[in-house]
Image: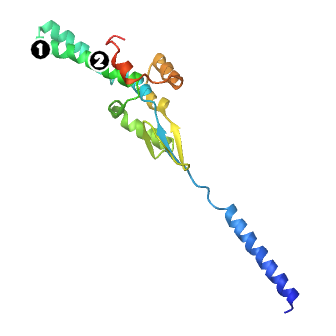
Amino acid sequence: MSLHNSAISCALGLLVGIAAIAHSNARAPVEKKIRIGVYDPRAIAIAWAGSDFNPVKVKRAELDAAKKSGDEAKIKELLAWGPVHQRLLHFQGFGHVPVGDLLLPVKTGVMQVEKAKGLVAIAMECDEVTTNVQVVDVSEELAGLFVPAEKAHKIVVSLQNAKPLGLIEIADLKDND
């Protein structure tokens, strides 16, 4: 084989090799991002507060019954419960604090949202993520599990543009605020 034919064969081989590499790179799978759902805890608290999961109606009925029967111990217990419950709701509804306890009654629905959105997890927040992670806001979907009234739904939507209150500011709120 002549030097000229060898050079042509080598060049053709190189071109075939480059074409094969280019073809395999073109078909390389795109790295699928890991999807993590996040939510605004205030949205959950606001939707939960107006739902049947909030025991305040039951507690009011218990208080009325205790007053009718003269059960002073029960009256004292329920009157103490109210402000504590309201204080906790202030922190959850106005601040940036965990609401996992509020999500427990709708756990099945949370898992359905996770599956429908193709998520590997749902958490209150992700402080830091890598480039292969996609953060998906599921606040409205989770709040919707409590079937909030229209007024509550509007508040949930409006939270996207409002910063949570600071913990000290919430601590200074009165029970009826």
Q: Position of residue 21 (x, y in %)?
A: 70, 69
Judged left or right of residue 117, residue 87 is left
**Up/down of 6 relative to 128, above or below:** below
Residue under label 2: 56
The percent coordinates of residue 26 (x first, y second) are 69, 61
Q: Is residue 164 visible?
A: yes
For marks 2 and 1 on the same chain, the one whose residue lies earlier in the sequence: 2
Q: Left of 136 or right of it: where is 49?
A: left
Residue name at image x 47 percent, y 37 percent: 38
**Mark 1: few, some, or many residues within 10 Å (few <14, many ≥20)?**
few
Q: Is residue 119 above or below residue 17?
A: above
Compared to residue 29, the image places residue 50 above or below, namely above
Q: Which corner quadrant holds the N terminus?
A: bottom right
Front residue of 108/71: it is: 71
**Which residue was labeled with disc 1?**
73
Which of label 2 and label 1 is nearer to you? 1
Report crowding for label 2: few under 14, some 14 to 19, many 20 or more residues within 10 A (C-alpha): some
Q: Quadrant of residue 54?
A: top left
Quadrant of residue 165 in the image?
Answer: top left
Q: Residue at x 52, y 21 (%)?
A: 158
Q: Position of residue 88 (x, y in %)?
A: 31, 23
Residue toward you, 142 or 175 = 175
Q: Is residue 51 visible?
A: no
Of the 4 image quadrants, the one containing the C terminus is: top left
- Secondary structure, mark 2, is helix
